Image (cartoon, grey):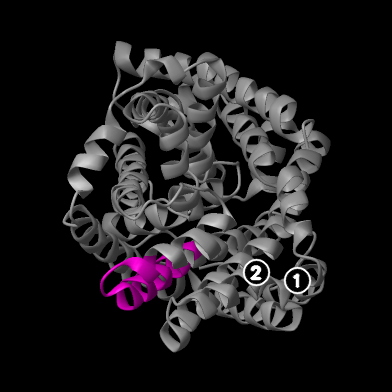
Amino acid sequence: MSPFSRPVFSSRAATLLSMIGVAVGLGNVWRFPYMMGQYGGSAFLFVYLGCVLLFAIPALSAEWALGRATRKGPIGALREAFGFVPGTLAGGLLLVTVTIAVSYYLLIVGQILYTAFMSVTRGFDPTGIAVFETGLGNARLQYAIGLAVLYAGLFVIYRGLGRGIETSSKLIVPFFGVTVVYLVCYSLLLPGALEKFADFLKPDFTQLGPAEIFAAMGQAFFSMGLGGTYMLVYGSYLSDRARIPGDAAITGLGDTSASLLAALFLVPAMLVFGLDMSSGPGLLFATLPRLFGQMPAGELLGSAFLLALALIAFLSAVAALEVIVAGLSGSDLPGLRLSRGRIIAAAAVVETIIMLPSALHPPLIGRLDLIFGSGMQVLGSALAVLALTWCMRPEAGQRQIFGDKRGWLRSAYFHWLRWVVPAALLFVLLNYVLTVMLAA
């Protein structure tokens, strides 16, 4: 193998577990259940599922296909599609975005680990809950834990695709799945839970307007890990035999199942104990500790859930670090001529430095996420879809997705991917800018 050749996933199972590990993250837990509660219960769910099938899974297929076609990261892939200067600027922007975004994401993962540890040592009594809520204010502790998560992620990257990413995914994804399924069963067996959850699920289509539909569409894109970065790089590790449409559908199903399981666990329990649904860090570090504090065996269940959540979020952090390392490798930037080990060392230094401001001033995390979070994800995914469908020959793009299969379905799918999916992504981006960034 040449120093710049690309490894590939060892098996289909390893591929799917790795992809699901990237897709499933904090958004499945701290955003989806809240959105269901706010936007009409199962009415929102129906719209969300439609957006996953019609838009998110096709966009995922395009990102994988572009990655496999080029065997490169964001800069290299977009250079091949758009030309040297535009591709370098667009790919460089995505790489900078990931570099900044992972710096504060590592702190959040570290805080979840801290909360899981504190739940074992202090429990979920009022004193322990106060510690959870003020944990982000302890700058030294937050920075130290964030650095530990960073170096653990870089160690996984250093071990490579097979011994690092695949092995971690094979251990963490099943553990997360088993833990959440058990918690769902436990939650639904609480007295009165099934009745309250049935009321919650009653569709209320009067709450669904354009804003709510855009929210469902945005959540479908955000939750899947799209952005022209994670999935593009992991797509570059797909074997030539990988069946992109089927594997993308399974990944989408796995991600959606994680969101639904999180809702099935959290919503009934919160309704039984009379807690209001919240979202974001407030859910993890305030509402959930109160929930576990009231549940029978809550200390054990809460610790297991928080540990599983921290580990699955860790896989997303690993993917982000892999984007940085792979995006600066010799195959993407031949003039750089840096070994993978040196790039990992450089990434460690850079992330150690840029993580510090967010650790010292936690409100900065929210501001950075407004700029480098969801909006840039949508822009990056739109660039990847446009690169595959407009800058590659249509026959080559279709062959990457469908192989040698022909027929009207292949052509219709590609035209949908070429025209409708980019339009949906751009509408979501515009809505995000108008309703979130400008409002903030």
Residue 423 in the figure: left or right of residue 15: right
Q: Between 346 and 48, which is closer to the camera in this rendering?
A: 48
Task: Tell whether label 2 touches label 1 (CB within 8 Å).
Answer: yes
Q: Secondary structure at mark 1?
A: helix
Q: Type of residue at label 2?
A: Leu
Residue 141 position (above or below residue 392): below
Q: Is residue 307 magenta?
A: yes
Residue 415 position (above or below residue 94): above
Report how far apart the C-alphas of labels 1 and 2 lie in the structure: 7 Å
Look at mark 1 in the image and give the residue it sits on: 359
Residue 428 in the figure: left or right of residue 242: right
Q: Residue at left 47%, top 55%?
A: 25
Question: Could you tell me residue 307's position as x and y percent?
Answer: 41, 73
Crowd tier of the residue under label 2, counting other residues whose Cα lies within 10 Å: few below 14, some 14–19, many 20 or above: many
Q: Between 34 and 78, which is closer to the camera in this rendering?
A: 34
Residue 372 in the figure: left or right of residue 51: right
Q: Which stretch did the figure color magenta?
A: 292-313
